[in-house]
Amino acid sequence: MRRHCPLLFHFRASTELLDRELGGTLEAGTIVLHFPREKTKEARALLARDAEVSWRAVREFAGLPVEGRKVHVFLYRSAEEKRRLIGAAETSFTKPWLRQIHTNDAPSPHFILRHELAHAAFADLSSGVFAVPGRLRGLVPDIALVEGAAVAADWPPGEFTVDEEARALRELKLLPDLRRLFRPELFYAESGPRAYVAAGSFIRFLWRKGGAGAFRSAYAADDPQADALADAYLGWLSSEPAPARAVALAQQRFASPSIVRRPCAHEVAELRREAASIVAGGDPARAAALLARCVSLEPGDPSLLVELRRAQLRAGDIAAANATEEKALGHPNLSQPLRATLLTESGDAAWAASDLATARQRFLSALALVQPEPAERALRARLWALSDPRRSPALRKLLAEGDTGPETVLGLKELQEAEPAEGLPSYLLAKQLQNRGGWEASRRYLAQALSRRLPHPLFVEETLRMQGIAAWHLDDAARGRAAFAELAKNAQPGRALEAKRWLGLF
């Protein structure tokens, strides 16, 4: 979840001007979609379905009728276009009092649309000036309640549920104080990711305990009952242990303190953005100098050392990169996921230098650590490649060097034919096709991957997910439901939630 403020004031552009710039409009029940004119007919249909299903979900969460005032959703081609037209580049935001949502376009199902639709949907519950709860008739919004309600209604899927992440935060002693969190103007005094998880989990608890009626009453009265329910919520949260993987991953995701508690946070953020732009422009040595400045400003953040090492490698300063790597590996705040990332990248450098023994040792060390599922899959693919000399050339180009060009794809096809019992080359070919929008072409390779041997159950799960996503893009409801129903079998709560959400779209 990202930081969103539904009360940003952007009066620079009228609806008429935005429609002239974007060019495409479509009504999907209560939702009016405004999008780039070049969006294909198929993509428009998927967006409309996503919007209708998401609107129904958040209205039903609050026990409100699906019908209501029209809500206008503006989707911009890029952050730059959005900045030019309305003055905000990366931030998604909603104007509840106008029933307007502004966000950057993305493939459907849109990753933030349901969250933003919740802000618009709950405008019917508030009599405040800006249709949100808060002091002085909403002039000072209760951001914890506003954002917590949106998270609770959206209930985003992932490897872990929001409640599991909240349990992990509690175990790490990073869970914000609920009574303090819901006090005026203190939401942003907390770390953004922690605040969103805590507020969302708490409001979901209120909803689960008292139903939609209790939620409507709390939102309308600007009273989330944090003082009254905090102990009951914390008792419920403590009734089950946090998954060990969730705790380890939370150490990385939720490590940063609030921006107001980091004296150089804004300067570091600006330097990082500038360094990323400079690297893209082809001057990694200058970027490394900026990142070194970041490290000196925030020595407690080991992720800066990882970024610095990458820039040093790009600049060809191997000695400096090795020294930075050693410093990062010895950093007291280095989490398991970030250590795994660093070891994997170190192994990639050794692999590129044909030092296969060192590469394998680094990859095995990384594999012993908790890391996000995509990173673990990629790591297992590396080890699979190193187990046979025939596999290394094509997979090294793809995984260690990031080369997705024709020669790499050809190498994967040759490997697929040379090893008819192995499913990983077919899986990787399907992944490349889907990254390019080749949904129909990917299906043959996905079926082939499942009919062959895959290195680990994580690849089976991802192949099923990819089958379901391909079916979504191809409007094949039967195959989509079958894939996600299979994925849901024996799934952990987070993945079961993900499958259920996808099934609701077909």
Image: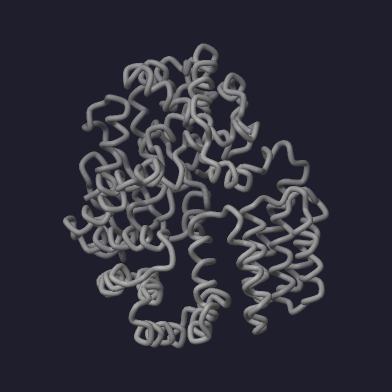
What color scheme is it? one colour
Residue found at x 51% / y 47%: 91
Q: Position of residue 207 (x, y in %)?
A: 38, 23
Residue 291's quadrant in the figure?
bottom right
Q: Is residue 98 visible?
A: no
Q: Residue furthest left?
A: 478
Q: Position of residue 422 (x, y in %)?
A: 37, 76
Q: Look at the picture and state if 344 lies above or below 492.
A: below
> Which of these two is toward me, 90 or 36?
90
Q: Report the number of discs.
A: 0
Q: Residue furthest top?
A: 228
Q: Is residue 432 visible?
A: yes
Q: Position of residue 175 (x, y in %)?
A: 60, 31
Residue found at x 36% / y 34%: 120
Residue found at x 37% / y 28%: 123
Residue 451's quadrant in the figure?
bottom left
> Which of these two is toward me, 268 or 470?
470
Q: Position of residue 318 (x, y in %)?
A: 77, 76
Left or right of 43 on screen, residue 400: right
Residue found at x 48% / y 22%: 236
Residue 472's quadrant in the figure?
bottom left
Left or right of 213 on screen, residue 406: right
